[in-house]
Amino acid sequence: MSLRGKVAIVTGASRGIGRQIAIQLAQAGARVVVNYSASGGEAEDVVQAIIEAGGEAVAVQADISKMSELEKLFAEVDSRFGRLDILINNAGVMTCEAVAEVTEDSFDRQFAINVKGTYFACQQAMKRMAEGGTIINFSTSVTGAMLPTYSVYAATKGAVEQMTRQLAKEFGPRDITINCIAPGQVATDLFLTGKSDELVDSFRRMNAFGRLGEPEDIANAIELLTSDKARWITGQTLRVNGGFN
Ligand SMILES: NC(=O)c1ccc[n+]([C@@H]2O[C@H](COP(=O)([O-])OP(=O)(O)OC[C@H]3O[C@@H](n4cnc5c(N)ncnc54)[C@H](OP(=O)(O)O)[C@@H]3O)[C@@H](O)[C@H]2O)c1
């Protein structure tokens, strides 16, 4: 129970990787805020699973791409728990499109959620996070590859990696670490939706183990970076991808 007494926000924790992170942080003793934008029923299921396992969690709705909703999320955490120690900026969206097909709406939506949402959540953390805190942003291992249809999504995550590097020097004086996790292909809705079995198989063969990542593979890395042993690691991007690139 290494995180006992700590309060963690996991954005986009109703499904996929965020769900598993919320469950594992709660198992480690943290009180967890399960953020979601649309999947309220699934977020409540995550909270229920945590409580049944003896943990503490609450679901809070907020579309992280909207400043007013982000402020409401952090204010609610303040009033409920009175502290914030861990922020996992996991919420994200991906639309795979060839350059000729990309629309202004899809470009703006991906930047609004992946970049703007992550940035202003970091700003909220700067105002409220306790000393000794931890922020983990989400990139993708695709930033280290060259793949058709990923140009906009990879650009948003490249921006997240860069903001993480620059922000490390602003958070350091407050004794807050900020890093990026860059997963490879993980078997969630985000990766699987719209892909043929053949395409999924080809991604499976691109890493060293010949399987897709599971949410637990990523949540385990989050546990490493939130441990006291990781206090000298900041401004870095950790590729958690089974050797994809
Ligand atoms: N899966 C992969 O292969 C992979 C690889 C590399 C990086 N990643 C990154 O890992 C993170 C998690 O991905 P995932 O695969 O777990 O995706 P997922 O299964 O699609 O889940 C996405 C989560 O984000 C939430 N979300 C989406 N838009 C939101 C918004 N505006 N405000 C608040 N929450 C929002 C969703 O909740 P609602 O349903 O309530 O909107 C959901 O809980 C993302 O940042 C993604 O880019 C994933």
Image (cartoon, grey):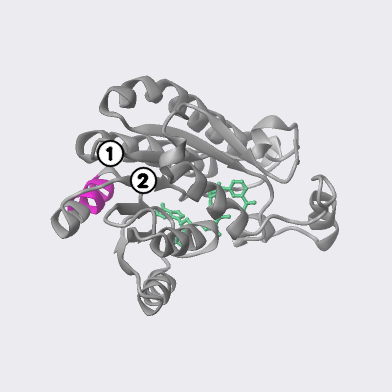
**Residue 15, magenta (yes or no):** no
| Residue type, label 2 | Leu
The quarter of the rendered structure image containing the C terminus is top right
User: Going by the image, does 144 lie left or right of 65?
Assistant: right
Residue 10 seen: yes
Question: x%, y% of residue 44?
Answer: 37, 74
Front residue (pair 202, 48): 48
| Residue type, label 1 | Ala
Task: Identify the residue at image location x=54%, y=44%.
Answer: 106
Q: Which mark is residue 87?
A: 2
User: Going by the image, does 213 lie left or right of 46?
Assistant: right
Q: Is residue 82 above or below residue 165?
A: below
User: Going by the image, does 203 lie left or right of 30?
Assistant: right
**Residue 72, magenta (yes or no):** yes
Region of the chain picked out in magenta, as a range: 68-75
Q: Quadrant of residue 87?
A: top left
* SS at mark 2 in the image: strand
Measured Cα–Cα span from mark 1 to mark 2: 7 Å
Question: x%, y% of residue 159?
Answer: 50, 28
The quarter of the rendered structure image containing the N terminus is bottom left
Quick check: marks 1 and 2 in contact, CB under 8 Å?
Answer: yes
Q: Is residue 197 above or below residue 233?
A: below
Q: Residues within 10 Å of mark 2 (few under 14, many from 20)?
A: many
Q: Is mark 1 within 8 Å of ligand 1?
A: no
Question: x%, y% of residue 89?
Answer: 42, 45
- Residue marked by disc 1: 125
Q: Which mark is residue 64?
A: none
